[in-house]
Image: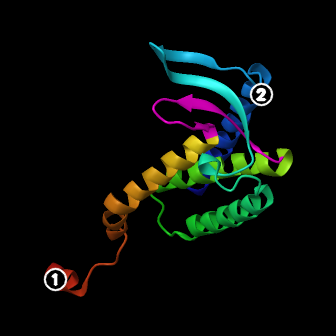
């Protein structure tokens, strides 16, 4: 599962970089490209935004602090994942999405000084990118894993209880 984690993380980073490069090459600063509309409402649109903050433009202008916190969090998350003795596929995918997305946005902060956002989705009034999607979906899947799967999955690897051993005799 460790190899799958790194392959998926790398794939998410590459997809993030490619989508951001395509957005930067094809969308002007003041452009709004409507992809799906319903009447006057844009369901899906693309527009370019340089976000110097975090989610919902919070911590605007705190790029260095955000980069440091993100780097520390990514290291801790990766260490925690690698220390797990038994890795379920859903847990692996979840952590890979979070790490891949986190690295994608960290790359932007370090090398550009801002994160490139370009996706607008109704009814949300904010703009995001592929890395953000990875982090959010990865976190949701990870919560689902820990709520519904983790305990049952780890029981498969637990040594039998003494009462179970006695009943087998």
Residue highlighted by disc 1: 169
Query: In the figure, residue 49 lies in which quadrant?
Result: top right
Which residue is rendered at x = 68% and y = 56% of the image? Answer: 59
Residue highlighted by disc 2: 24
Q: Is 161 placed above or below 2 here?
A: below
Can residue 4 be spotted in the picture?
A: no
Can residue 110 be spotted in the picture?
A: yes
Q: Is 162 placed above or below 67 here?
A: below
Q: Is residue 22 left or right of residue 42?
A: right
Residue in front for this viewpoint, 166 or 94: 94
Residue 160 horizontal/vertical position (percent): 28, 78
Residue 33 horizontal/vertical position (percent): 64, 18
The secondary structure type at the circle numbered 2 is helix
Q: Which mark is residue 151?
A: none
Segment tinted magenta in the rendering: 113-130
Q: CA distance from mark 1 to mark 2?
A: 69 Å
Question: Which quarter shows the N terminus?
Answer: bottom right
The secondary structure type at the circle numbered 1 is loop
Question: Which quarter shows the C terminus?
Answer: bottom left
Marks 1 and 2, the one that precedes in the sequence = 2
Examine the structure image and report whether residue 87 is included in the region drawn in magenta.
no
* Label 2 Cα crowd, 10 Å radius (few <14 / some 14-19 / many 20+): some
């Amino acid at each position: 599962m460790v190899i799958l984690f790194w392959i998926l993380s790398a794939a998410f980073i590459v997809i993030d970089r490619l989508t951001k490069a395509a957005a930067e090459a094809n969308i002007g600063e003041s452009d709004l490209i409507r992809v799906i509309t319903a009447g006057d409402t844009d369901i899906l649109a693309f527009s370019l935004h340089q976000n110097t903050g975090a989610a919902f433009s919070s911590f605007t202008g705190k790029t260095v602090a955000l980069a440091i916190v993100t780097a520390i969090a990514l290291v801790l998350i990766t260490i925690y994942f690698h220390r797990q003795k038994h890795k379920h596929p859903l847990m692996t995918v979840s952590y890979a999405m979070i790490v891949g997305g986190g690295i994608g946005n960290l790359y932007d902060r370090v090398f550009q000084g801002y994160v490139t956002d370009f996706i607008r989705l109704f009814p949300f009034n904010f703009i995001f990118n592929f890395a953000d999607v990875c982090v959010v979906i990865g976190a949701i899947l990870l919560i689902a894993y820990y709520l519904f799967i983790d305990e049952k999955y780890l029981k498969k690897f637990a040594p039998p209880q003494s009462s179970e051993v006695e009943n087998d005799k």
